[in-house]
Image (tube, rainbow, N blue to C red):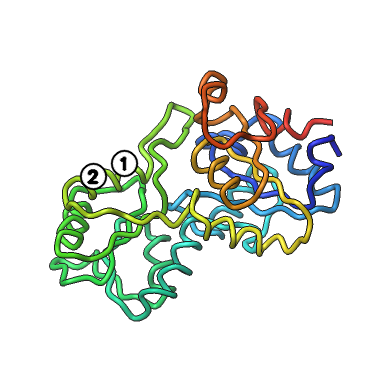
């Protein structure tokens, strides 16, 4: 294994911007994952993508030639489901999110009312960006939050990389609802501690763990706050100049992409 990889017993790997950008795999990234697996060390894919269920992510991984199982995938929906099950069991939820996110909320034991014509008083508002976001969804969320329902978001990522340029992330949805309702959202995905805890538990290793991501705030900052080493790749939303100017938690390595980071 390369020197940096040889120092760690497990790997927590981001997806968007690390393994793929939009529908396109990052060149060399699948082969880098294969090299890591060949060492016999475990890895977990940890993503703030709120649109997909773990099974969807697994299918996409295999489509890019990357082996993976649902147990190795921790999405922000997985983190959200655990968070809601602990704090709002049996509650009523307004959900801004994809069908996969709705299933996660229902899996936590909550009744989802976002698809009804009239939204009653809710116990919680769940925010998760998705491609079919509508003004109606945002209105329901703002009304419920304005009435006092706590707002829980999958994350605060402002932008998500795609092959045609960046697109708005969940952070843009959060900003809309916070501004309109006056509420303040709690984000449960990266950089929050729950996401890193679940990923670390899935690894089931005692030794040091390396986290790899393309964001300085949610990936590097979140991992370091959780007591992990973090490496940054520049194949996503962060440029070399932004990495050089960053004054937050420092990555242990900065590389052009995952292939370069884990190169022989």
Q: Position of residue 217 (x, y in %)?
A: 49, 39
Using the numbered discs, state the Cα–Cα distance from disc 1 to disc 2 in whole angstroms: 6 Å
- Residue under the point 53% across and 37% down: 23
Disc 1: which residue: 172
Q: How many marks?
A: 2
Of all residues shown, which one is farthest toward the top?
A: 241
- Residue nearest the viewer, comparing 248 with 88: 248
Q: Which mark is residue 176?
A: 2
- Residue under the point 71% across and 31% down: 28
Graded by Cα atoms within 10 Å as few (under 14), some (14 to 19) or many (20 or more), the crowding at tag 1 reads: some
Element assignment for label 2: helix
Graded by Cα atoms within 10 Å as few (under 14), some (14 to 19) or many (20 or more), the crowding at tag 2 reads: some
Q: Position of residue 210 (x, y in %)?
A: 70, 46
Q: Is residue 13 above or below residue 54?
A: above
Q: Position of residue 52 (x, y in %)?
A: 47, 54
Horizontal side of 109 relative to 177 (left or right) equals: right
The quarter holding residue 198 reads bottom right
- Residue under the point 77% across and 61% down: 206
Q: Which mark is residue 39?
A: none
The reply to whether callout 1 and callout 2 are in contact (CB within 8 Å) is yes
Horizontal side of 190 relative to 99 (left or right) equals: right
- Residue under the point 50% across and 59% down: 53
Q: Is residue 105 above or below residue 231?
A: below
Q: Is residue 26 above or below residue 156?
A: above
């Amino acid at each position: 294994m390369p020197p940096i990889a040889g120092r760690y017993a497990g790997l927590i790997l981001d997806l968007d911007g690390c393994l793929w950008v939009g529908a396109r795999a990052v060149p060399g990234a699948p082969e880098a994952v294969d090299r890591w697996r060949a060492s016999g060390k475990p890895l977990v894919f940890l993503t703030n993508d709120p649109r997909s269920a773990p099974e969807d992510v697994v299918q996409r991984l295999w489509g890019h030639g990357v082996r993976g199982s649902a147990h190795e995938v921790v999405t922000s929906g997985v983190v959200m489901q655990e968070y809601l099950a602990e704090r709002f069991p049996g509650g009523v939820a307004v959900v801004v999110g994809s069908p996969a996110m709705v299933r996660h909320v229902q899996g936590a034991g909550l009744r989802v009312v976002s698809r009804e014509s009239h939204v009653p008083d809710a116990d919680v508002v769940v925010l998760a960006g998705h491609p079919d976001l509508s003004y109606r969804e945002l209105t329901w969320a703002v009304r419920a939050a304005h009435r006092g329902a706590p707002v829980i978001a999958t994350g605060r990522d402002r932008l998500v990389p795609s092959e045609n340029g960046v697109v708005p992330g969940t952070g843009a949805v959060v900003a809309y609802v916070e501004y309109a309702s006056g509420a303040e959202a709690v984000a449960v995905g990266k950089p929050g501690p729950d996401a890193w805890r679940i990923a670390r538990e899935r690894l089931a290793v005692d030794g040091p763990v390396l986290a790899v991501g393309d964001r300085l705030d949610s990936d590097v900052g979140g991992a370091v706050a959780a007591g992990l080493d973090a490496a940054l790749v520049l194949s996503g939303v962060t440029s070399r100049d932004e990495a050089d100017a960053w004054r937050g938690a420092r990555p242990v390595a900065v590389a052009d992409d995952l292939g370069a980071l884990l190169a022989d």
